Image (tube, rainbow, N blue to C red):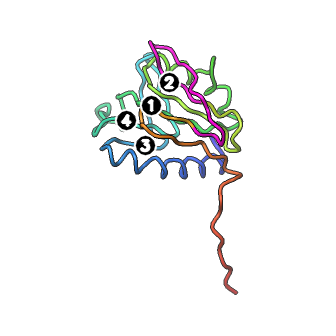
Amino acid sequence: PGGTDTGEMWCDLASNLRAVVKRRGWRISLDARHRLPHPTTTVVFPDIAIHAAREIECRPGTHTAVRVPDLVVEILSDETYERDMAPTGAKYLAYEASGVKEYYYTRPDGRDAAGFGLIDGRYQPLPQRQGGWFASPLLGRDFRLVPAATRKRRATKRRR
């Protein structure tokens, strides 16, 4: 379970990634159920999952994706911090064992931002450049995990 900052951040990040995903004919999902092959009974709800495919196979009679995502982003809350983090978090280990090619996570305020690429079946850290930018091999472009606290907000006028 995340908080309001967590949900707001994933919506912002997903909208930024959506254009790249759509242009390539891939699929993006938010908080969708995925069954992973390792461990075999693992079901996860990645905050953002990108599939480098036009179609995502689902388990018959459910809305559970059985295709392993190619890229996952998790926005960490205090409740999910231990479960998602490297190198011992259950989600980190399950994504690595299941073959998720890229895994990123951050907290809504930008703390603990990290990215990993799968090389020879093991995650290797992806360098984070100044400003929180990561070069995604899968996307072929840079993106950043922007802290919610530093995003510019639209000014709204109050009506009286």
- Label 1 Cα neighbours within 10 Å, binned few <14 / some 14-19 / many ≥20: few
Instruction: Return the residue at label 4.
Output: 51
Please indicate whether residue 112 sits to the left or right of residue 67 in the image.
Answer: right
What is the spatial separation of the Cα atoms under label 3 and label 1, in whole angstroms?
Answer: 19 Å
Ranked by sequence position, the earlier of labels 3 and 1 is 3
Q: How many marks?
A: 4
Mark 1: which amino acid?
Pro
The C terminus, quarter of image: bottom right
Q: Are marks 2 and 1 in contact (CB under 8 Å)?
A: yes
Pointer 4 or 2: first along the chain:
4
In the rendered structure, are the residues bearing label 4 and label 3 in contact, judged by CB atoms less than 8 Å apart?
A: yes
Residues rendered magenta in the picture? 115-133
Q: Residue at label 1?
A: 137
Residue furthest front in the image: 130
Which numbered disc covers residue 117?
2
Q: Which residue is denoted by mark 3 in the rendering? A: 29
Figure quadrant of residue 109: top right
* Front position among marks 4 and 1: 1
Picture residue at 30% right of the left edge, 44% below the top: 25
**Pointer 4 or 1: first along the chain:** 4
Distance (Cα) linking label 4 and label 2: 15 Å
Query: Badge 4: how crowded within 10 Å, few (<14), some, or many (20+)?
Result: many
What's the amino acid at mark 4? Answer: His
